[in-house]
Image (tube, rainbow, N blue to C red):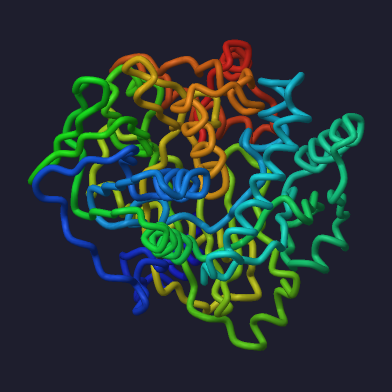
Amino acid sequence: MAPVAMRLAAQSLSDAQPVPFWLEDPGKPGALPALTGTEKCDLLVVGGGYSGLWTALLAKERDPARDVVLIEGREVGWAASGRNGGFCAASLTHGFGNGLARWPGELPKLEELGERNLDGIEEAVARYSLDCDFERTGEIDVATEPYQLDELHEMYEEIERLGLADGLELLDRDAVRAEVDSPTFLGGLWDRRGVAMLNPAKLAWGLKRACLDLGVRVYENTPGLDLVSVGAGMGVRTPYGRVLARRVALGTNVFPSLVKRVRAYTVPVYDYALMTEPLSAEQLASVGWKNRQGLGDSANQFHYFRITADHRILWGGYDAIYPFGGKVSAEMDHRPETYLKLAEHFFRCFPQLEGLRFSHAWGGAIDTCSRFSAFFGTAYQGKVAYAAGFTGLGVGATRFGGDVMLDLLAGERTERTELEMVRRKPLPFPPEPIAWAGIGITKWAMARADDNGGRRNLWLKTMDRMGLGFDS
């Protein structure tokens, strides 16, 4: 980073508050009391992020008489569900390319299910009056290097060959800059309907209210400590009591699963984001962005960015930090060296916004698995179900995961449970220090590929053949 660029980036961060922008909201609901004593229920949901909230809501929609309890270790939405960029995608496979590489025969069905899932989210937003700034504006994958432009064209041709290109539009340099103006943009692929933008914390809080209105009993500051079989059902111990349930759905994601054998399939990856102050009318005019799409660049180490309801720009991504040993720690929630790097990249993308300042800077952990998209399973003779490994794509896909868990707990064969994606698991991560070394080499190789026209070295090609990867 050049000294002048570093100085300007540092100045832009001088007033940034080290808290997630979305969670610093005066409308944030108060925490509900912790569970004390013994509760009994038909279904216990562990985790108060999107995964748990959608599961509880869908369970009550399927059977309003079902007695459902949800426990959350802190407060609903405090972790990844309240810290993400607010991209709610239809894709269940972490994008078309990953889906095609892993489940080519199922991809049309997976795309259809993903579209129906996003439609279901939009319908829930309307039905339950979820005040979360939901806008189905789509997303543009932008190319900032010539090789990325070639890759976008190749991907579009493949999507078109499979008959899945409805709603997609290739944009040349002038067309993409007419949407959002950056001198770094060479072209793009606009998915007009497959992604919605929203306020992530407000979605979590709205889902909490909807669950309560349907009769779900929600306990906050109530972590699940251990899971044991109790007669025909299950028991989960909490700090001040326990829950006895016929069935249990685990939506703990990045946090250690209560089913210990599941833990090897995920690692925590820390992702970081900046939020600007509101743009003036002149600043808005200089970037355009009238259609309010989400954007992401096409590099291995990519940025994601979007505009908020009050005309701020969220800018995140690039660094994906894996802590040695896979420990989730509050100390990792902030990383000034990454904030500085992100700020410099921001002004490289939008030089016309020089002088704009960042109001917030934060990070958080994402549950990453080796195939980049969620996996599912059961334990304790089908009395417990889990979904995890959403790898940064959980805003939308967790609702699908909730449906899968409920199908599995019911012992039903459905179009979801018949999917190879649902029936098979990713390769687990190796133990330390092999995981640390392997992830480090992979990150280095990905950065080299970004600097070398996208050419993947032998390490990345070997990882591709093994179906292994590392991403946020």
Which one is in front, 312 or 434? 312
In the figure, 98 relative to 47: above or below?
above
Residue 19 appears in the rendering: yes
Residue 449: percent from the left, percent from the top? 63, 30
Instruction: Locate residue 334: give its quadrant.
Output: bottom left
Q: Is residue 436 visible?
A: no
| Residue at the image point whose x is 19% and y is 53% from the top | 221
Residue at the image position 16 percent from the left and 51 percent from the top: 35
Image coordinates for residue 263, horizontal then vertical, percent: 32, 23
Judge by depth and name the residue closer to the eye, 199 or 63. 63
Residue 376, percent from left and from top:
48, 25
**Position above or below: 441 against 164:** above
Q: Quadrant of residue 178?
A: bottom right
Q: Is residue 113 left or right of residue 27?
A: right
Compared across the picture, whether 49 is left or right of 260 comes to right
Q: Nearer the viewer, residue 4 or 369?
A: 369
Q: Residue furthest front?
A: 65
Residue in the image at 72% along x and 64% along y = 182
Q: Position of residue 21 (x, y in %)?
A: 40, 68
Left or right: where 126 falls relative to 388: right
Classify 261 as above or below 280.
above
